[in-house]
Image (spheres, grey):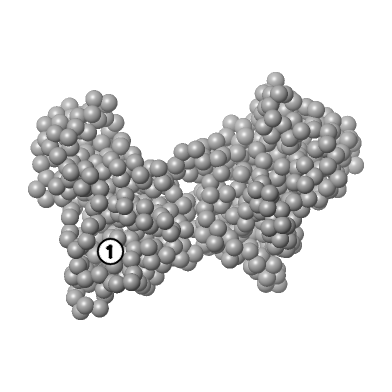
Amino acid sequence: MPMAMNSASSTRPAVPPGIWCPVISLFKSTKRQEIDLDASYRYFSHLIRGGVHGLVLQGSTAEAALLSPQERIELIHCARRAAADLGVPRFPIAAGVSGQSTNETITLVEDAASAGADFGLLLPPSYWSKAVTNDTIIDFYEEVADASNIPIICYNFPGVTAGIDLSFDILTKLAEHPNIAGVKLTCANAGKVTCLTARFPPSKFSVFSGQSDWLLPCLIGGGIGCVTGIGNVFPKCVAKLYSLWQEGKVEEARQLQGQVALAESACKKGLAATKYGAGVFAGPAAGVTEESTFYPRKPYKPASKDVKEATIALMGRLKEMETSLPDTVAYQMDPPKLANGTNGIKPTSLRSHFVLNNWCEDPSQAAFAAGYRHFDCAPLYNNEAEIGKVFAAAPIPRSEYLVTTKLWSSDHQRAEQALDKSLSDLCLDYVDLYLMHWPVTISPDTGAEYGKEDRKVHVQGWDFTDTWQEMERLLATGKAKAIGVANFSTTNLEKLLATAKVVPAVNQTEIQPFLPQDRLHAYCQAKGIHQTAFGPLGGTGSTLHDEPAVTTIAKKRGVATGNVMLSWGIQKGWSVIPKSVNPARITANLKDNFSLTQDEMLEMDRLVKLKGGKRFNRPDWGTVVFHDDVEAGVA
């Protein structure tokens, strides 16, 4: 017998309360419209950052009837991975498990549970609707619940079940089952809410509305949340509505309820309208910008011109509010590996990547062949046009590699123009990560050659917080999927975060055994900012390759000294950017890394204590940039 979610004495709701989003399915722009897992990852991440309290996969809004069993499993894996990468590995996920036979349904439940779903959302059978009696429904649910390793949530949606309705009497009977945890009511029957909640506490049987346009009536009647399609479009607004109720701000909640209801009325024009609205209003913020990704699966048609216009008119009222609300991840116990500015970039893909720095295209071609999938560029390197030739002839699809470029200090006041220039040179439509290269704004009007301006002549009345606001706006354009910073100290990050709406995804800075930046790294971890190390092998004049601790480990492991330092950095928790023009070294930098033992890690950590801190890249900006060096005694 499967375990119920809560014991009989528990007061915690059987299903986590709040806003659950029934996630739409995203498809590739191909003839067969295969599931687009990359876009789905970005979209799942966006919704979780939007503050929803749970995801529902493979429901009616997800076109579950059009998904194969394998696609269902892959989507659960993808959602679970997105949640884990945001620091919430146990984020609540329910999966649609509705089949027309008991046997088929149990198989779907088994697949969902094995893939990582926490609940199974189950419609009544309806293929031969006249043969579906009350006893048939009760037997069906009880037999599935008996066989299930995850709790079952009843799903009442007469509109998709040939009019079959789960009555109060049926739900009362099902609520007694120890492995049936609640119900989603997409029948707008407030009477069922009040009757069920009068009979059962949420710890026994949790009641949710199936739309957000009657969320407040449901909550007033004793329900604990809703499962709402408009959550795909405006997750922050719907989560805000729920939080206002929780905070006792009833009048504010009532006013927002009206706006949410009007926006959701567009969803009732059909799935094509919901998906079109999601593509227009949520897609850019999620980093999913291709309109066809949001088309329904064939044979069903995209929204018509009239439906599009009506959808924009009804949903547009929430656009400004959604943009103004901050990212919030429910249940977050640990900081995410990548923070709010990521738009779905996977931390694992940042683990090791090749810097295209002051070289022509040959090394980057070697990097593709070696297996590198993240390329770090910058206009300051004066080679983006050459690198663009490589990207134009890349041997793999654009979706399978990442590109970072940077905003130079004399471009701080024209961020989008600078990004457009980089995109043109790189032959790309977007970059995956756009970094502010330095936290100093210098004038572009000195007449000096680009990149060789006087770094001590700073623009007055403008600082990096103003630049960051310009970069935040770029996310909505789709030209940059994520934004971050480089060469920022703890002090400068604190100043940035005091006014930022988006937390930097990455801080790229010099990190190597003589400069471990412990204070900065701890701060970034606490704030969910991923650290990327340039110069991980030291710089000109470095003795790291000759240090006995490094050479001893290298000899023992049969690798180059550089791989010892790269492996140490990766194991410390940051990404590394090795650079080389030698094809053999390019391959070795990626392939020859290993896991150091605890003793080996301690030996590497002792280097800075024995030899003292050393920074190899220290340009003079005429102001303090490396604030952490003073405390750490770095030369």
Residue 45's x, y, as percent? 52, 49
Q: Is residue 285 visible?
A: yes
Residue 89's x, y, as percent? 51, 37
Q: Which residue, given by chain and number where applicable, does mark 1 sit on?
A: 440
Say if 88 sits above or below 240 in the image: above
Q: Quadrant of residue 126?
A: top right
- The structure residue drawn at horizontal position 51% and vertical position 41%, both measured from the top left corner, is 332
Q: Is residue 98 left or right of residue 48?
A: right
- Give the crowd class for mark 1: few <14, some 14-19, many >=20 residues within 10 Å: many
Q: Is residue 411 left or right of residue 617?
A: right
Residue 185's x, y, as percent? 78, 45
Q: Quadrant of residue 269?
A: bottom right
- The structure residue drawn at horizontal position 77% and vertical position 42%, both measured from the top left corner, is 222
Identify the element where label 1 is drawn: loop
- The structure residue drawn at horizontal position 26% and vertical position 73%, both measured from the top left corner, is 443
Q: Nearer the viewer, residue 404 or 359?
A: 404
